[in-house]
Image: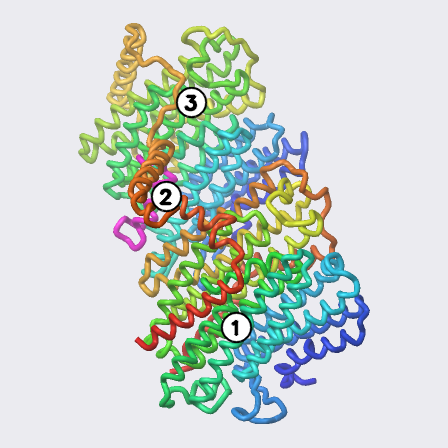
Amino acid sequence: MSGIELSPAWTLIFGAALVPFLHGKARAIWVLALPLAGMVQLWLLPAGEFGQLQFLGERLLLVRADRWSLLFSCVFLIAALISSIYSLHVRDAVQQAAGLSYAGAAIGAVLAGDLLTLFVFWELTALTSVFLIWARRTERAYRAGLRYIVVQLTSGMLLLFGALQQLAATGSLRFEHIGLEGPGGLFIFLGFGIKCAFPLLHNWLQDAYPEATESGTVFLSAFTTKLAVYALARGFAGTEELIWIGAAMTAFPIFYAVIENDLRRVLAYSLNNQLGFMVVGIGIGTELALNGTAAHAFSHILYKALLFMSMGAVLYRVGTVRGTDLGGLYKSMPWTTGFCIVGAASISAFPLFSGFVSKSMILSAAAGEGLLVTWLVLLFASAGVFHHSGIKIPYFAFFAHDSGKRCEEAPANMLAAMALTAALCIGIGVYPAPLYAILPYPVDYVPYTGSHVLAQLQLLVFSALAFSVLMRTGIYPPEMRLVNLDTDWLYRRFAPALAVGIEALGRTALSGAQRLLGGAPSNLLAVLRRVHDADGILARTWSTGDMALWVALMLAAYLLLYYL
Amino acid sequence: MTLAHLPALVVVVPLLAAPLVVLVRRAAAAWAIATAACAFSFAAAILLSAEVAAHGPMSYHLGNWPPPWGIEYRVDALSAFVLVLVSGIGTASALYAWRSAAAELSRDQLYLYYVMHCLCVAGLLGMTVTGDAFNLFVFMEIASLSSYVLIALGRDRRALLAAYQYLILGTIGATFYVIGVGLLYLATGTLNIADLAERLPQTASTRAVLAALAFITVGVSLKLALFPLHFWLPNAYAYAPSAVTALLAATATKVSVYVLLRFYFGVFGLRLVTETLPMAEILLVLSLIAIVTASLVALWQENLKRLFAYSSVAQIGYITLGVSMASPDGLTAAVVHLFNHGITKGALFLLLGGVALRAGGATMGSVQGLGRRMPLTSLAIVIAGLSLIGVPGTAGFVSKWYLVLGAIEAGRWWLAGFVVATSLIAVAYVWRFVEAAYLSEPGPATPGRGEAPAAMLAPALALAAACVFFGLQTSWTVGSARRAAELLLGGVP
């Protein structure tokens, strides 16, 4: 079992198991020490393959350290450290334990060299992260968590199913390029797609993330979806369908984000939109595009965490993140406001902020491949991002009309976490060379050329202008206290409606039959339930005679069959 | 006492322990004798398993009468594997009974309990080891009669009805089996299983053989609780004493599956069972129905013992599903699941027995907030539950893995999808426990803080640990199962 000890994943997972047994200072030191220890481990981890073992006659590869996996492990560890600092004030050990083991599982998945190991960690990320949602301890969060876990487990099942097809066809479980046409490719693609929040499969994200605790969402925003981006980049780079899927992903959440009132949900939509950029990069599949995807994932994890942290601080102090109830908080929380603006500038890809140096790579790759439509969609989406994340979030939370709410500045540990992240965002934006140095492929890309900067500034200025004009003229959709129904309409409204419809239909259809049969069951679901529940015919204690009758029937059936 | 006599001793020792216990009568001594006898069998079974793996099948001629005239005891890869399961669970259950049976039974009944325990284990071991079709019936009756008594010893008055129903149905099953054996004897003039397999292809009276197949199929299906012949099982498991539930759930149905495998592949032969007749298809359909309906029923149960009893019916469906594939991977899955499910269910029922002892019953209400009151027990139930679902790293995953591989190899993608998807129903019913134990506040029915007595907890935890151990270290289980599958498929041309 040589090599397993090298993986930071186990450090975090096993270390997290000890968190509930520690208290006070000891726990605080421990949760900070774990990601730091992981970083040291990662630093010491040479490129190569470790931890090969035989299981069920198949070769597993627990640790595959190459440029892709090391890059993602690195940013995951940074995110784990930041989230740990941010959640230091939390007294609830469940959150810290779940968050750290979740980070460990994500790192384990990224380092996995075969599909079975990937599947195990894939499911482990789901199982650990759901506790971050439940830690909110509200009925609403509980329900959202259940929906979340069902979706995530389904994604894992699809992955496993596809992996088995791979095994049957190729005799190997190694996780290399799969491609849609490969055996089981479609299932694995769907499994990855669910976790990556492809359009129509995205809903769990906006549903669950805003329901988690304030520090839980910071953890959540970093790992699950970026793990999926990593998996897609490995398995499906250059799959043309991804360009269209990604383009759709960048565009459609904008409309929802603009009308959404819950600011953390706005961020969830913009998370979805940012994933779209990465997916497009994977779809293009050139070295520049894949570098762009990796770089964007790196910087995205940081600025998205920063934005969620600032909103988490607001939630922690004010108790709500509804746009309608906030405003004017810059007076009470000046530091948080500043950090939020850094995050907003980064996500909007202002020059000198991290988003600019990574996103422009993807845009350049799209332009370089002559994908005009894609490029235009991405451009539109960039404007949209600036609009809803760059302006709307800080504006409604900290400025706009004064809500009259006065509160304390965020706790010191939150501010420290935000300051660290903000420093990284600006650092990457100003001096991208270290990031470029660890990208999967050699980089000869220069972000700060005159045309790049000018084009981006034009875009931002006009977007800002549009927002101001719309606000002034009152055309901008006002924030309202509504639950926006997205495709979750399918299961929140449509499915119950369908059930009612079927029931009605069944009633009508059966009413005739009912007269003949008398008291016939009136709909399908009810039949299923009635047959199986505690008093159902299949669960009841039968009389001995009935049981014996069945035995006789079975025997008769077999004998009859043989004589036929 | 040489190795050559072990095939007989593995059965004879617990069988002779029974009258010895009657003579001794004192509860403590009775327990010691029963446990020692089971432990001896366990050790013998492990030795036999190693011996068979190294040197091939062993044949023991009882009274030095050579087969096919005398009774032959035969230990091969398959029977050695089942012997280890049965004797191992028998030992764990006996250890557990020290405190558990003492709490549930009146003092003067205790020695009778250990008598029946010894007889039941001896009967099941005998069924496994014998190479004679009629001798198998005798051991089947020993095991069945003792298990009726064991179930009837349950504290709940409904245990009597459950035992009565099992008695009627079990007797029908055994009778059908013996009728089938009689018909085979009529057609071939032999009772030795290996000899039967040789003579059957030459026999002229196919009608009698077909009728024998039908009788044996229905009889054994009843004993192994294949849908729709499973209705005796839930109550029998739910109301029997805790140690008995674990013993029966982990071994009795599994040995019946073993008998089915022996007859389908070792006597009637692959060609008759799968090619001439649609037995595989029928078994497949019944298994699928069993998996879905029993899992759904489990979903709505309030009594946890009943819940896991229905889950047993579903899990047996997975085993017979593997049997119905009649391929190397399918049979490996069936045999390995027979073992893996045995230890998983054994662990679950032993743990639930601890809950029942502390709370006076194992219902959804009594496990609310159990995570805080009995942390070890709850954690172990969750681990065994994960094995039931088939989560990687647990024994259950290994079986599901081969089941899915078998389905894929046969080109039945839908079946592979079915196996993966139905695991989600198991997720749901195990989830109900997790939700009650960890996400609910303790209710009035929840026991106070404190675990079950160590004598009960230790064997239960050992089995739960085995669920994880055999999920990671698969060389022995999968190796034995694969050899057994090759044996079954190669046994009859």
Q: Is residue A506 visible?
A: yes
Determine if marks 1 and 2 fall on one subunit. no
User: Which numbered disc flags the more N-terminal residue, 3 or 2?
Assistant: 3
Of the pair A140 and A149, the residue shown nearer to us? A140
Residue position for label 1: B172
Query: Considering depth in this image, is B356 or A532 the residue closer to the camera?
Result: A532
Q: Sort mark 3 into few (<14), some (14-19) or many (20+) by Cα contacts within 10 Å.
A: many
Q: Residue at x 45, y 52 (%)?
A: B423
Q: Is residue A61 shown above or below A553?
A: above
- Picture quarter with the C terminus of chain B: bottom left
Q: Is residue A192 magenta?
A: yes
Tell me which residue sits at (40%, 49%) in the image: A157
> In the rendered image of this protein, does residue B381 appear above or below residue B35?
above
Give the structural element (helix, strand or loop) at label 1: helix
* Element marked by disc 3: helix
Q: Position of residue B278 (x, y in %)?
A: 34, 71
Q: For mark 3, name the chain.
A: A
Instruction: State which mark lies toward you, 3 or 2.
Output: 2
Q: Which residue is mark 3?
A: A426
Instruction: Chain letter for mark 1, please.
Output: B
Do the residues bearing badges 1 and 2 touch, measured as CB atoms within 8 Å?
no
